[in-house]
Structures are given as C-alpha cells and as structure tokens.
Image: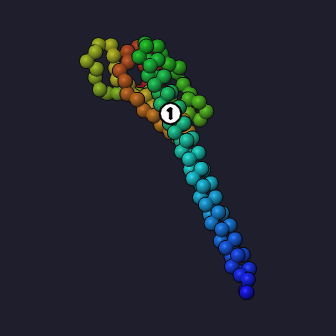
Amino acid sequence: MRTRQGWVLLDVLMGMIIVSILGALLGAAAAMHDRAAHHLDDTRAAMRQAESALLTMQSNQIPPEKPTVGNGGFLTVKKLPAQSQTPGMTWIEVRATVHARTATLVGLVPETSIPVGAK
C-alpha cells in the first residue's frame, strides 16, 4: 500500500494559509471598527459642546470669549441675518469642531448673551 505523505503536508499548508487570511481580515475589520468608534466619539463630543454653548446662551449667560473644545477643538458663534419675531431675541449658529469632526446647531437666544466676537 502506498502512503500519501505529500498530500497531508499540502493539506496542512492550505489550512494554515486559510487561517492566516481569515486572521488578517479579522484584524482589518477590528481596525476599521476602532477608527469608526473614534470618529463617532469626536462627533458626539462636538455635539455636546455645541449644545452646552447654545444652552448657556439661551440661559442668558455669556459663554467665554475664546471657548475651546477639548484638545484640538474650537467653538464659533455666528449671528444669523434672519429676524426673530420675539423682541430681544436673535438667531445664532453655534459650530463646534473636535478633531476635524463638526457639529452645528441653530437656536434662538437673547441678544444680550451673544459673545462680543460673534459676527
């Protein structure tokens, strides 16, 4: 009877190649998931900062003159040209950016709470 030692070796090598390919695909998927989670975290942080600034101004408080958002982020407030039908109130746009992820909110605030540098 003849033995098939060559075929067993070939089967083992093919199994190792398939396992290696599956491992590489799994590693790439995990890296993409991690990157997407970081982007989502930055977007949520920007939204929280924009909400906080808008709420501060709606509470008739003036936000800091040069507000910063986390590390590497910033906050801008822009007065919109639209006229409000409520006396003493104006429309503003609050834009927060964290690590190149931006969140923008538009809201109605008292005119006295708009920062000095707002356009």
Asked if 24 appears above or below 52 in the picture, the reply is below
Residue 10, position in %: x, y?
68, 76
The quadrant the C terminus occupies is top left
Is label 1 in a helix, a strand or a loop?
A: helix
Which scheme is used to colour this image of the protein? rainbow
Residue 115, position in %: x, y?
46, 20
The residue singled out by tag 1 in the image is: 44
Front in this rendered view, residue 19 or 25? 19
Answer with left or right where residue 32 lies relative to residue 57: right
Quarter of image, res 67? top right
Q: Residue at point 61% right, 60% down? A: 22
- Residue farthest to the left? 85
Q: Residue at point 28% right, 15% down? A: 86
| One can see residue 98 in this view | yes
Asked if 55 appears above or below 37 in the picture, the reply is above
Q: Residue at point 28% right, 23% down? A: 83
Answer with left or right where residue 76 lies relative to residue 99: left
Asked if 32 appears above or below 47 in the picture, the reply is below
Asked if 69 appears above or below 111 in the picture, the reply is below
- Residue farthest to the bottom? 1
Answer with left or right where residue 93 lies relative to residue 32: left
Q: Residue at point 59% right, 58% down? A: 25
Quarter of image, res 4? bottom right
Residue 23, position in %: x, y?
64, 58
Q: Label 1 is placed on what type of residue?
A: Arg
The quadrant the N terminus occupies is bottom right
